[in-house]
Amino acid sequence: LFLTSVPVPSTVGLEEEVWTVGLSYGTGPWTVGVAYLEDEISFPGASSDITTWQAGGGYNLGSGVDVGLDLQMSEITGFGGGSWESQSAGLVLSVSF
């Protein structure tokens, strides 16, 4: 489990605050995890909110080779009153030696 919060002040009035929390579990060669991110950005006259959920899993093939799948869903609101949604997926290959 991890949790972070990072406020970022600026000399031009830009402020950003990011919260993340996640949980992962591994047993044998398998791992699974989920994470949540909330990002608030504001400066004089405008602001934006970004919310992201991420889930993934992986399998250790042995000898430093891992494969995994990652899914991410985001919603962005603000900046001109608009709202956008984004979905992405990725296949991961990790080789370490």
Image (cartoon, rainbow, N blue to C red):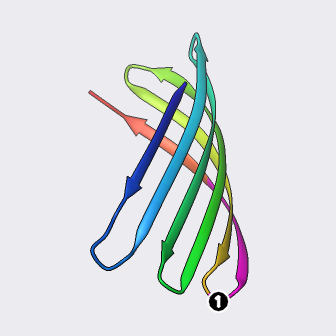
Residue 50 in which image quadrant: bottom right
Residue placed furthest toward the top:
28
Q: Quadrant of residue 77?
A: bottom right
Judging depth in this view, the residue of 13 and 28 nearest the camera is 13
Query: Mark 1 highlights which residue?
Result: 80
Residue 91 location (% of width, % of height): 57, 48
The relative height of residue 95 versus residue 51 in the rendered view (above or below) is: above
Q: Position of residue 6 (x, y in %)?
A: 41, 49
* Residue under the point 50% across and 73% down: 42
What's the amino acid at mark 1?
Gly
Count of numbered circles on the image: 1
- Compared to 69, does 57 lie above or below? above
**Quadrant into which the C terminus falls:** top left
| Residue positioned 47% across, 83% down in the render | 44
Q: Which residues are magenta?
A: 80-89
Of helix, strand and loop, which mostly describes the magenta segment? Answer: strand
Residue 83 falls left or right of residue 30: right
Check if residue 62 falls in the magenta segment: no
Q: Answer few, some or many: residues within 10 Å of disc 1's Cα (few below 14, many 20 plus, some between 14 and 19).
A: few
Quarter of the figure with residue 40: bottom right
> Picture coordinates of residue 81 (x, y %)?
70, 85
Per the image, is 81 magenta?
A: yes
Residue 97 lies left or right of residue 40; in this view the side is left
Q: Which element carries disc 1, helix, strand or loop?
A: loop
Reply above or below: 22 against 87. Answer: above
Q: Residue at x 51, y 23 (%)?
A: 61
Question: Which of the image's four quarters has the N terminus?
Answer: top right
